[in-house]
Image (spheres, rainbow, N blue to C red):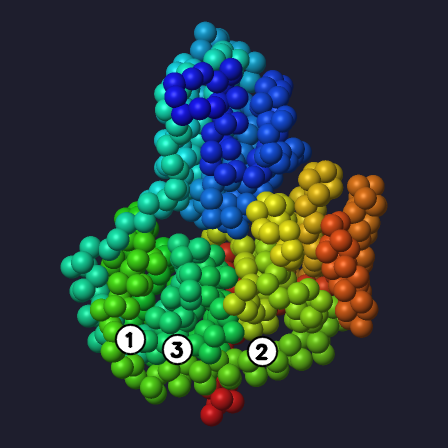
């Protein structure tokens, strides 16, 4: 369409043209009974992934957005289709992901009549999105689409919702002028706030950097690592910030909070300042931090004021993370860090590497016959799949091993996609499809998921086959919901009449075979290298492969003695580790 005043032949034709303008390469969803969305996209170059479940469709679109750094798009029907999508919207909002959800809506002249699948959808979705709009008149559609895209990517990114009333689906849509650009505008920091926080950073003798999800796609030219070197600061990430910095950097010490174990946990007691980049300081990221009157001060750099956490001492800058780091670097030019602190960071990083090797060896000795230690799975995965891979994760009992650096480590080219603190079951398994379609064809995508999450996702295996999304799924099979079983054992002991795990065949081999996918099951550690190597060859050739690995329920991640409600029971090992380091 030209940039002059014109009319699209239908609402869905206008939407298809706007998606082309946004640079969207894939749309996920499950349309309602009206096939107009597919008719409009029939001859476009946008890939359409038709899902079996709306929740998984939103998860896939979220994975796409996290990997691509641009909006994910999901198209669904109305009524129960919208309520099915709410869990996906909750995750997208929690993860601050730019996502556009487009849904059908009851015709204007039938609202309030008990029409087929009628629901007050705006009321249902508003708690989960940045903005929700219903379009009842065709001429309002272009403005609604442009505002939705602008709000999704600007400020703190997040999901938006556009509802298309049925009566306008086939109406012509007038549009004046070209579509407006829909790129994020990155506000520069206020000079006074930048100077004040730079002075506070300069005064710190033992600083740490905490890199959150808001720094994703904002570390071009490794500005964050260079800034850490200027300060002599140890680098930690949140789980969602992982993949932003190179984990082979000598100042990198792992994932903060829940996933920090001895001996590097000592750094949090010794530090005198945290510089948090794009982090909302969520509970999992601050688990185990010093508390009380002398709690650790934080300088926070975030885009949106709603992300500020002010129950700790410190200060903040409301601006783009990249612009803020560059501004601080300029103001701190010539700063001379405390060399002893940087050396302390390097020494505990080295001690952690040795401690991890010891833990992995201990776990291997304890593994029952017929199971594979998870630490061994991660080590063999690193050998089998080329560097630069993107690891997509869940957040269950055994797959949490991969959150603990250096049992799994990302190099400068590695990527990571994890669920937010909402941790909806099945997110990683589904999101991996979106990640695969957002990443360049040659970049490996691996999903490490528990069997409970994968079984929830298995209805989408035909979707995976149809989409041609070649993912390597490594499924850690402990017989069901291991985290819940571990909590139950703690409460009721081994003789409970309830059970969340049972040893039984999974049936995945038959399902994968039915859809032309590949499957292997591994119960012997010595057979794992060949299984992963063969599976990767199949994925590299273009076909998804599933490797099920039998693991033991007792194979808990480092520093964890078992589940204790939402959070694990932590082993008291700090003094022992410090003695070993000495």
The residue under the point 80% across, 51% down is: 518
Q: CA distance from mark 2 to mark 3?
A: 17 Å
Residue furthest to the bottom: 582
> Dot 2, how many residues are within 10 Å of its Cα: few (below 14), some (14-19), or many (20+)?
many
**Depth check: 240 or 16 in front?**
16
Residue furthest to the left: 192
Q: Would residue 242 be found to the left or right of residue 494 on screen?
A: left
The residue under the point 37% across, 32% down is: 180
Q: Position of residue 114 (x, y in %)?
A: 51, 11
Mark nearer the N terminus (2 vs 1): 1
Q: Position of residue 139 (x, y in %)?
A: 39, 16
Q: Where on the picture, by quarter, is residue 407?
A: bottom right
* SS state under label 1: loop
- Give the residue pinned by disc 2: 356
- Which numbered dot is residue 557? none
Q: Count the marks: how many?
A: 3
**Depth check: 61 or 145 in front?**
145
From this viewpoint, is residue 11 visible? yes
Mark nearer the N terminus (2 vs 3): 3
* SS state under label 2: helix
**Depth check: 274 or 432 in front?**
432
Q: Would residue 547 be found to the left or right of residue 143 on screen?
A: right
Residue 293 lies, with reference to residue 155, above or below; the image says below
Q: Position of residue 249 (x, y in %)?
A: 47, 75
> Dot 3, how many residues are within 10 Å of its Cα: few (below 14), some (14-19), or many (20+)?
some
Q: CA distance from mark 2 to mark 1?
A: 27 Å
- Give the residue pinned by disc 3: 267
Q: Position of residue 88 (x, y in %)?
A: 52, 40
Residue 297 lies, with reference to residue 83, above or below; the image says below
The residue under the point 38% across, 66% down is: 223
- Which numbered dot is residue 272? 1
């Amino acid at each position: 369409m030209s940039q002059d005043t014109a009319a699209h032949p239908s609402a869905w034709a206008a939407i298809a043209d706007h998606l082309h303008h946004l640079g969207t390469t894939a749309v996920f969803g499950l349309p309602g009974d009206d096939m107009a969305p597919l008719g409009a996209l029939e001859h476009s170059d946008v890939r359409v992934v038709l899902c079996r479940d709306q929740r998984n469709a939103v998860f896939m679109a979220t994975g796409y957005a996290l990997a691509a750094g641009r909006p994910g798009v999901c198209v669904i029907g109305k009524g129960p289709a919208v309520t099915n999508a709410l869990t996906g919207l909750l995750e997208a909002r929690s993860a601050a992901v730019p996502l556009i959800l487009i849904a059908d809506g009851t015709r204007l002249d039938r609202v309030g009549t008990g029409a087929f699948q009628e629901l007050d959808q705006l009321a249902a979705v508003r708690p989960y999105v940045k903005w929700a709009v219903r379009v009842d008149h065709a001429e309002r559609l272009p403005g609604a689409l442009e505002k939705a895209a602008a709000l999704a990517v600007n400020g703190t990114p997040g999901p938006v919702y556009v509802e298309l009333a049925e009566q306008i689906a086939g109406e012509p849509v007038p549009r004046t002028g070209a579509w407006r650009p829909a790129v994020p505008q990155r506000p520069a920091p206020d000079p006074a706030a930048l100077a004040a926080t730079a002075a506070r950073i300069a005064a710190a003798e033992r600083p740490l950097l905490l890199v959150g999800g808001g720094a994703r796609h904002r570390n071009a030219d490794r500005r964050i690592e260079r800034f850490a070197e200027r300060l002599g600061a140890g680098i930690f990430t949140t789980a969602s910030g992982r993949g932003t910095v190179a984990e082979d950097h000598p100042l990198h010490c792992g994932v903060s909070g829940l996933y920090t174990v001895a001996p590097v946990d000592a750094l949090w007691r010794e530090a005198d300042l945290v510089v948090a980049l794009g982090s909302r300081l969520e509970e999992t990221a601050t688990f185990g931090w010093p508390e009380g009157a002398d709690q650790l001060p934080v300088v926070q750099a975030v885009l949106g004021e709603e992300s500020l956490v002010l129950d700790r001492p410190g200060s903040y800058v409301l601006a783009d993370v990249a612009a803020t780091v560059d501004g601080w670097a300029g103001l701190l030019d010539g700063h001379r860090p405390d060399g002893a602190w940087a050396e302390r960071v390097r020494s505990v990083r080295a001690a952690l590497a040795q401690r991890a090797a010891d833990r992995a060896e201990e776990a291997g000795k304890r593994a029952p016959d017929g199971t594979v230690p998870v630490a061994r799975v991660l080590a063999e995965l690193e050998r089998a799949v080329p560097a630069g891979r993107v690891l997509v994760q869940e957040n269950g009992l055994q797959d949490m091993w991969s959150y603990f650096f250096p049992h799994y480590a990302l190099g400068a080219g590695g990527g990571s996609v994890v669920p937010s603190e909402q941790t909806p079951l099945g997110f990683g398994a589904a999101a991996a499809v979106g990640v695969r379609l957002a990443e360049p064809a040659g970049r490996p995508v691996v999903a490490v998921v528990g069997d409970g999450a994968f079984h929830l996702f298995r209805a989408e295996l035909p979707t995976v086959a149809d989409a041609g999304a070649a993912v390597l799924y490594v499924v850690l099979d402990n017989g069901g919901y291991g985290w819940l079983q571990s909590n139950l054992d703690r409460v009721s002991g081994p003789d409970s009449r309830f059970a969340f795990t049972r040893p039984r065949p999974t049936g995945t081999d038959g399902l994968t075979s039915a859809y032309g996918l590949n499957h292997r099951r591994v119960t012997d550690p010595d057979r794992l290298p060949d299984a992963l190597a063969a599976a990767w060859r199949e994925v590299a050739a273009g076909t998804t492969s599933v490797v099920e690995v039998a693991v033991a329920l007792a194979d808990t991640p480092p520093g964890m003695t078992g589940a204790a409600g939402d959070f694990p029971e932590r082993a008291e090992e700090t003094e022992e580790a410090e003695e070993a380091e000495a």
